[in-house]
Amino acid sequence: MSDATLHATEQNPDDFAVQIADQVESFLVAVTEVAKGDEPGSAVPFLLLEVSQLLLAGGRLGAHEDIVPDERYEPDPGFEPDVDELRENLARLLDPVDVYSEVFDPYEPRKAPVPARISDDLADVIADLRHGMVHYRAGRTTEALWWWQFSYFSNWGTTASATLRALHSVLAHIRLDQPLEELDGLDTDQDMVGDDTLEFEAGKVMAEEIGEQLGLGRG
């Protein structure tokens, strides 16, 4: 989508809201394109780049003073597209490395890792960002910024950060020729995952094999 469509012509490209909206829109478009699966060989590094750039926008929102919406109650944003198809496409594309383990809050002691999926995480982030984008496109700029800031702290910031670590880990294992343990038996429908579960039964899959399935080469 061009700037002419996304932004009103009188808006300054140096404006904070315009810059945040540009970064959000770039992420939405990029991940949607990756999910089509046309270039599976570049999926993981490209997603790593896009999530990194999105978290820069999140950091700016987090450092900004609290944004207060114009209205007490959030206006009805109207129709929002479903993310299930995108989620399923990403799951197929990332199948060898989709499931990973994550500790949600590093400041809560003795919390066991829990299973998560990169595809679920990206779809959840997309849903949050799209919600704010509906407000932005309708001219409710303050409402959009409030939502993006609020959901950054409450959901998508944590989710995107975990996804970034998972994507970084995949590439690090491949580029450094380090064995990557397979997560067979670990899935996101489990209520609790302890140390025994995380001692994966399937043995080790060499990083080269994972890289071959994703079409990745080492630099």
Image (cartoon, grey):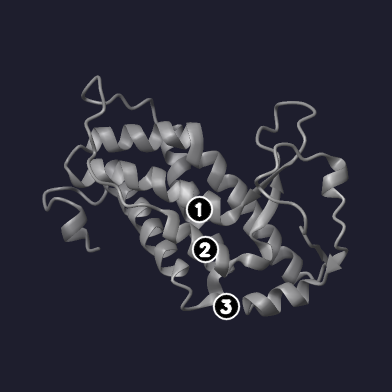
Residue named by callout 1: 122
Please provide percent x and percent y for residue 36: 43, 71
Question: Mark 1: which secondary structure?
Answer: helix
Identify the residue shown where x is 32% and y is 52%.
81
Residues at discs 1 and 2 in contact (Cβ within 8 Å): yes
Residue named by callout 3: 41
Where is 88 relative to 79, above or below? below
Where is 214 relative to 95, above or below? below
Q: Which mark is residue 64?
A: none
Residue situated furthest left in the rendering: 10
The mark closer to the camera, 3 or 2, is 2
Q: Which mark is residue 90?
A: 2
Q: How far apart are marks 1 and 2 (CA)?
A: 8 Å
The amino acid at mark 2 is Leu
Of residues 114 and 48, the one nearer the viewer is 114
Instruction: Give the mark nearer the N terminus: 1 vs 2.
Output: 2
